[in-house]
Image (cartoon, grey):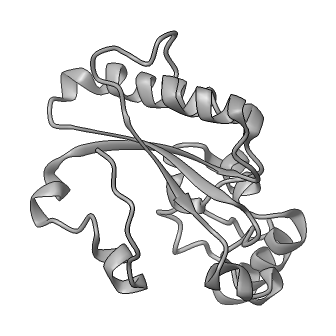
Amino acid sequence: MERVEELSYLELQRMDDAVAAHARRRYWKGHYLGELTDDAIDAFLLRGTPDGRGAHLPSVSLQAYGGAIADVPDSEAAFSQRGTAFEFVAAASWTDPAQDDLRIGAARRCGASLDRFACGAYVNTLTDEGPAGVRRAYPPDKLARLTALKDVHDPDNVFHLNQNIRPTAR
C-alpha cells in the first residue's frame, strides 16, 4: 500500500484507532533515521530478508519529520530528536498465539536491518527493549532530566507499565 497525504495531527493520531484491533497481538520495532541514503532505502525495501519476499513479513512505514515537529526546541519537551528526518517502523499484527515467534522474529529482523542507519528511536516503538531502548529514545541529558522528574513525582515507580524511566535507586 502506498499512502502519501497531508494529515492534521488529530487525523494522524486517530489513523490506527479501531476497537477490534485491541484483540490482536502486535509487535513493533522502530528507528529514527537522520537521512535516507540509498543503502537505507534498500534495507527498508528488503524488510530484513534477502529479497524482500516471504510470508508474514511486517508492515513497514516511513514518516517524514521536520516542519512543526522541528520548530519546538528539543529541550522543551520529553519528545526527543526533533531534528531527525524520518521515523521508520516495522509493525506486525496477528491473532494466533502460535505465530508469536514467527511474527516477532520477522519484525526484529526487519528492524535490525536498519540498525546501522539509526540515530535513535521513538519511545512508542520500543516494544521490548527495556532500559537499553529507553536510552535509545532519549539523549543522556534529557534522560537525566526525566529521571529527576520521576524521582520527584513517582519515586516508588507506580507508573512502570510503559517504557519505564526508573527513578534513581535510593
21 up-or-down from 14: above or below: above
Asked whether residue 170 appears in the rendered view, the answer is no
Residue furthest to the right: 141
Q: Which image quarter: residue 169?
A: bottom right
Q: Which residue sits at x=31%, y=43%?
A: 26
Locate residue 101, reporting x and y percent: 35, 21
| Vertical order, 119 against 159 (above or below) | above
- For the N terminus, which image quadrant? top left
On the image, which quarter does residue 55 sit in? top left
Look at the image and tell me in which quarter the C terminus lies: bottom right
Question: Which residue is at 47% across, 63% downward?
Answer: 161
**Does 107 sit left or right of 101 as displayed?**
right
User: Where is residue 82 shown, x and y percent of the image?
Assistant: 72, 72
Residue 89 x/y as whole percent: 49, 47
Residue shown at 34% from the left, 26% from the top: 103
Give the tally of numbered discs.
0
Q: Please state which of residues 112 and 144 is positioned toward the viewer in this rendering.
A: 112
Report the side of 102 relative to 144 (left or right): left
Instruction: Judge whether 148 appears above or below 42 on screen.
Output: below
Residue situated furthest top in the rendering? 50
Q: Which residue is drawn at 72% across and 87% down?
A: 71
104 vs 19, left or right, is right
- Residue 57 visible in image: yes
| Residue 139 versus residue 73 in the image, above or below | above
* Near-viewer residue (90 or 131): 90
Q: Position of residue 38 (x, y in %)?
A: 70, 33
